[in-house]
Amino acid sequence: MQNNKIFIFDTTLRDGEQVPGCQLNTVEKIQVAKQLETLGVDIIEAGFPVSSPGDFNSVVEISKAVTWPIICALTRAVEKDIDIAVEALKYAKHKRIHTGIGTSDCHIKYKFNSNREEILETAIRAVKYAKRYVEDVEFYAEDAGRTDNEYLARIIEASIKAGATVVNIPDTNGYCLPGEFGNKIKYLFENVKGIENVIVSCHCHNDLGMATANTMEAILNGVRQAEVTINGIGERAGNTSLEEIAMILKCHQHLGLQTNINTQKIYSTSRMVSSLMNMPIQPNKAIVGRNAFAHSSGIHQDGMLKNKNTYEIMDPTDVGIDENSILLTARSGRAALKHRFSALGIKYENEQLDNIYQKFLKLADKKKEINDDDLMILAGIDRKHNHHIKLEFLQFTSGFGIKPVASIGLNIAGEKFEACATGSGPVDASINAMKKILTNRQMLMKELTIQSINKGSDDICKVHIQVENEGRLYYGFSANTDVVVATVEAYLDCINKFVIN
Ligand code: KIV
Ligand code: ZN
């Protein structure tokens, strides 16, 4: 086995997609999967097929759409899960089943009301069962981070004997200290018979901010597959971020370890995932945050002008940040727009290009310079054109010493409705007016987040909303240079998700 290659296993479409509000439809998942293929990931975890028909279908369609990476489907150590995963992977050119079970005493006792011996038998049965259908079987020992090392070694050895080709050691709860996690991996290499014949993987969560450090410690102790997500998205505080591992290994060439990642595709992939999942990237996020390469203090700027090495350990162009990218304005043509979108991983042609160009012109009229973040937002808004309930118009008056009032026009499946209302402010008045039209829908706003993107009073603001309907939470997003319009549109984005007619 090639011992200096680190396999990159991307779970953005499975662990990342579990994040509330980040759900993608099948077309969007295919778009991300193809981008991951271009980025050079070795394995794409495409979903958990038994969890829903939507997840099943996505694994089927991704399997058809993607050629080179292995397509992996997650299961519990349950035969029915494995049967459904096998079916979903039917069209995959290279396929893997990822099956496993919780192995910490806490999981064994409270999740399964079982004991170590029974769990060991269930794990062996699941691996053997999966092995009947696919050659490549990955076994995960959930909560391995908190699993007793001796028992972990026994269950990993048993899974290898049963046929596992990859064994995954997850720090499910992001609990371990880096040294402790590294020692766990070392212990397994020293105590598990047959471990030299399989790939050892790690899957770290970021609950204490140590996911990347733990993954690196694991790699330094022999792990050769890193399970990661774009922008570090994932359950709770997220997973290890792909871009961090790829760039650590690139910057520390002395380790002699390589990945297949084309790092120049990192930036466009990061922006695509952020935009499709409506998941903003924190400005100081390593590698892909807006400020990751911004030098603001006078001393730093002075150093940078003298020699970039003073404050830059990597070249922004290595992660695909094009410093000379054309700044788009209302005078830019279709070709420039198409070129910029394509650098961000989005292809527009013909009629689609015309449509997005018209939206671009409208935005450029309001905002002088259009940057990549603005473009990704435009692309996101473009995806909403087939909403069932659309905003036709919105007018509001507010100010000091007057009562805010709003009138609104909605188009519901082609029929037009109008209403007006007052409120505590223009947002409240607009939403009250909207609710007067949608009287038969039960909805309760649970959260409203308003964020600006860059600087300046002409900036686009992004609005994330959570609305509860019949006990379920729905997530909506919109962006506009007008904060009130953005809020109403985000609200409608939510409503469109639970309204059928
Ligand atoms: O965090 C975890 O343990 C997981 C497993 C299903 C691999 O996501
Ligand atoms: Zn996980």
Image: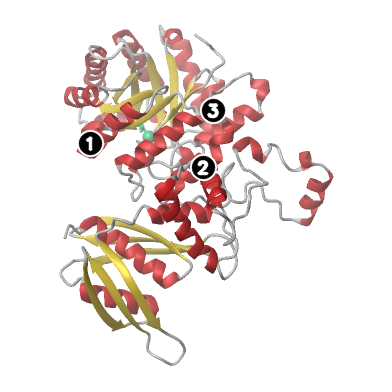
Task: Check disc 3 and give the amino acid type.
Answer: Ile
Q: In which quarter of the image is residue 486?
A: bottom left
Task: Check disc 2 and give the amino acid type.
Answer: Ser
Label whose residue precedes the other's in the sequence (1 or 2): 1
Q: Residue furthest bottom?
A: 401
Horizontally, residue 293 falls left or right of residue 486, namely right
Q: Quadrant of residue 478?
A: bottom left
Query: Gap in Å between the C-alphas at discs 1 and 2?
Result: 34 Å
Depth order, front residue of 223/414 = 414
**Residue of label 2:** 342
Query: Gap in Å between the C-alphas at discs 2 and 3?
Result: 19 Å
Answer few, some or many: residues within 10 Å of disc 3's Cα (few below 14, many 20 plus, some between 14 and 19).
many
Residue 35 is situated, as x and y percent measured from the top left of the image, at 45, 35
Horizontally, residue 339 falls left or right of residue 53, namely right
**Residue of label 3:** 261
Q: Quadrant of residue 63?
A: top left
Is label 1 in a helix, a strand or a loop? Answer: helix
Residue 151 is situated, as x and y percent measured from the top left of the image, at 35, 19
Reply above or below: 84 against 208.
Answer: above
Q: Please state which of the two labelled residues, at mark 1 or mark 3, is closer to the viewer.
A: 3
Residue 129 is situated, as x and y percent measured from the top left of the image, at 21, 15
**Residue of label 1:** 51
Q: Which residue lies furthest to the front in this view?
A: 350
Residue 104, can we see it? no
Task: Check disc 1 and give the amino acid type.
Answer: Ser
Residue 494, can we see it? yes
Q: Please state which of the two labelled residues, at mark 2 or mark 3, is closer to the viewer.
A: 2
